[in-house]
Image (cartoon, grey):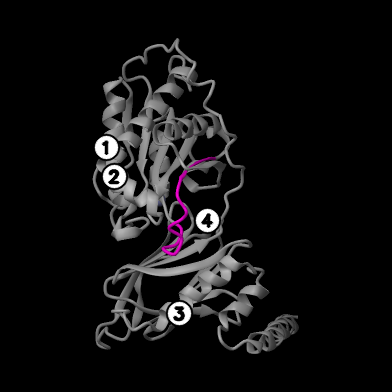
Amino acid sequence: MPRVHWWLSSLTSILMVAQLAPIAEAKSINPSVPEAKALGFDSTETSKSLNVAVDSQGSEDDPYLGQSPRSQVATIEAIDITVEGNRVLIRADRPLDQRSYWDRSTLAYQIEIRNAQLSRDFQRPDASDSEAISWIRTEQADSNTVMVRVMPAPQVSIGEINQPSPSLLSLELNGYQARGNLAAPNLGANLSNQRDLGDIPDGQIVIVLDPGHGGRDPGAIGIGGLSEIDIVNPMSHRVRDLLEEQGVRVIMTREDNRTMDLQPRVELANRVNANLFVSLHANAISMSRPDVNGIETYYFQTGEQLARTLHSSLLDATGGPDRGVRTARFYVLRHTQMPAVLLELGFVTGSQDARRLADPEYREVLSQAIARGILQYVRQHCPGRFC
Ligand SMILES: [Zn+2]
């Protein structure tokens, strides 16, 4: 039986490859695209992104291509999927040299990293935390080649591979639309009429604030090198100060710039029995989409009202653009036992947002809007100690 089964599955693989081969050969200019179409990623956006990725491979101004001395093999220490689930980060101890393409046999997007080895305590990524990725596999293909294969989820296209630093590769996944609708306009209208807001009893309300990135994870990198970490870290501290002035107890998932996995953040919030969990992020799409700007607020199940209150407060303070309140199965939203939201405060890749987010005065506006929204929610929904 096992032999027959083996034979059948081999035959199936051969047939799949045989079916694909003529399609791939029919268009030789950019062999990546037909596979992408075969996978159902047939959109202008996809083709455009793929072209960008393919074109960038051999560009003359890539400082890392072919320059790492053969004797210095890079050690790949970790591959992480970002909190938002829309980027894969590959981290090493030396400059990385990669090429990437659609792999015909697995039908996945393949990143071939030459002159590299997996670290002995290499951390494998967990695709179950990302809706944008069906699966991700890493292997030491030969003594100094590492292969990373990523199968994007349906409707998701592979975007650019950026190299925020020589030893860090960032693969963008585009087109991931969290479920849910754009916010109804006017959603904050009835909130601003609430006048009779009570005081918050000192120290009885506990908020866990989560600066979305830190340590070896810089988050998104955008226009002019603006990084997510440079935005959300100072803002988290400012929001904490503003809330503590009002008698709210704030616990940060990280006080310093250390790396924090998702699980300990959630465990912390659950352990201290926090009333609310708020994660701060800045968004990114592609460097070729400076036209995409705006604020998005995410929740999962219990966080909807908190999300709407915070989103409304942010839009009131900044004027938008409004990219909506949405649901998403982000890890920190799914596993927290209290109302939890994830704020995407603007796009580091957006021309309008990047300019504003780089400005400390604008970040102050955002910080105040977040603190105001949290206080408003607490006053309305947390009588006594319960939200
Ligand atoms: Zn983020």
Of labels 3 and 2, earlier in sequence is 3
Residue 132 falls inside the magenta stretch: no
How many numbered marks have been drawn onto this rendered protein structure?
4
Which residue position is annotated with label 4?
130
Q: Are marks 3 and 2 in contact (CB under 8 Å)?
A: no
Q: Which residue is mark 1?
A: 237
Left/right placement of residue 165 relative to residue 332 reads left
Vertically, is 233 above or below 273? below
In the depicted structure, whether residue 153 falls above or below residue 307: below
Residue on which disc 3 sits: 55
Whether residue 29 is situated above or below residue 245 in the rendered picture: below
SS category of the residue bearing label 4:
loop
Pointer 2 local density, CA inside 10 Å: few below 14, some 14–19, many at least 20: many
Q: Quadrant of residue 185?
A: top right
Q: What span is in magenta?
A: 285-299
For marks 4 and 2, give the CA distance. 23 Å
Mark closest to the chain's N terminus, 4 or 3: 3
